[in-house]
Image (cartoon, grey):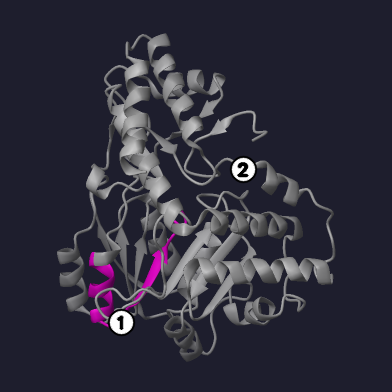
Amino acid sequence: MRNEEMLLIPGPTPVVDSIYDAMASETRGHTDPRFVAIYKNAIEQTKKLFKTDGEVFVVAGSGTIAMEMALINTVAAGEKILVVSQGYFGDRFIKLGQAFGIEVDVLQSEWGNQVTPEEVEVKLAEGNYKAVTITHADTSTGVAANLDALVPIVKKHGALVILDGVCATAAMEEDMSKGYGQPDYKIDVILTGSQKAIGVPPGLAIVAFNQTALAAREQLERVPAYYCDIYNWMPVMNDPSKYFATPPVNLIYAYDEGMRLVHEEGLSKRIVRHTAFGKGVRAALSEYGMKAIADEQVAASTLSCILYPEGVKDAEFRAALGKKGVIVAGSLAHLAGKAFRIGHMGNTTEEMLEKAIELIGATLNEIGHTVDTAKAVERFKEDVRAVV
């Protein structure tokens, strides 16, 4: 990669040369047949990614736009949703729902823990919920949702499953054809962005609907949106030569190449690789007296939120590490200054993460916190090999 730094934050993530090269291709008109063919292929590869029997939408926007599209095209004002929140970004659905007059109930876990299936079961039994939002991997905490446990409960109670895959898609299993316990107990909507495990620069909102979710949109007749109304985008997704709003041509080039790389590696291999990286990074950092706030059994494979040892100052540590070319992120809310977040997803490689662990150790030694970098690097290698 020609990147000058290792961008190991929870997103954006490192971009490989072939994606940069695709993005730097000549800009063409959005109705040019050559661009139309690329856009159409990207859409088809996205359907393959999610294995949906419905429609996918790949449009200019952030993950927040994708969240809004997912919600307002399935739930009307006055209807109820349950937000299953395991961190800061799960909570975002609260404000989104309230902005559109949707009734919102929330189950919030303590940061580092999961909302339990029992809590969801009790809550869904209380009322008529149209949908339940679940964040697959919360970017603030590094906690992963237990879909095998949660999806059957939600579907049993007749609600839609809206899955926020922003920090999970293309790294953790998100199969819309999978029946969770029953053949028709499936994920109805998945939303994501281009800049995390897919490994493409920021700027694309990606949403997949199954047939059940599309039927929910049809029942709404109209939605309180224009740009985010999937009915305005559906003709374009079926025939990209049609026009609604100008697509980000060069970003679609990049995304098409990103999808090619995802499928070339294969989803099953990507899931194993990300699992190995997550376990390896957390194990290695534990050698430095650093602890992930999420226990291993609930930890996401794409990022980790790591508590500092006593005496390590957040700003000093991240600044010194940054000078060595490794960029990690600060933590949010009540963990600000007490922890940092490290991404290990997308186009990151074993060699990159091994080097990052070495430089994290060197930085700790530099600021007066003595650690054994060689031992941590070896622990990373051992734990990665144990999975792969």
* Circles 2, 1 touching at the beta carbon (< 8 Å): no
Question: Quadrant location of the N terminus?
Answer: top right
Q: Which mark is residue 183?
A: 1
Q: Is residue 375 left or right of residue 258?
A: left
Residue 341: percent from left, percent from top: 41, 36
* Residue 54 versus residue 11 in the image, above or below: below
Residue 87: percent from left, percent from top: 33, 50
Q: Residue at x 26, y 19 (%)?
A: 310
* Residue 233 versus residue 305 in the image, above or below: below
Q: Nearer the viewer, mark 2 or mark 1?
A: 1
Residue 301: percent from left, percent from top: 37, 47
Nearer to the camera, 186 or 130:
186
Residue 117: percent from left, percent from top: 19, 64
Q: Residues within 10 Å of mark 1 (few under 14, many from 20)?
A: few
Label 2, label 1: how far apart the Cα atoms are: 38 Å
* Residue 85 versus residue 190 in the image, above or below: above
The residue where tag 2 is placed is 15
Nearer to the camera, 81 or 235:
235
Question: Quadrant location of the C terminus?
Answer: top left
Q: Is residue 208 magenta?
A: no
Q: Which residues are magenta?
A: 149-169
SS class of the residue under badge 2? loop
Which amino acid does the dot numbered 1 rest on? Pro
Q: Residue at x 24, y 75 (%)?
A: 181
Q: Quadrant of residue 3?
A: top right
Q: Residue at x 63, y 76 (%)?
A: 226
SS class of the residue under badge 1? loop
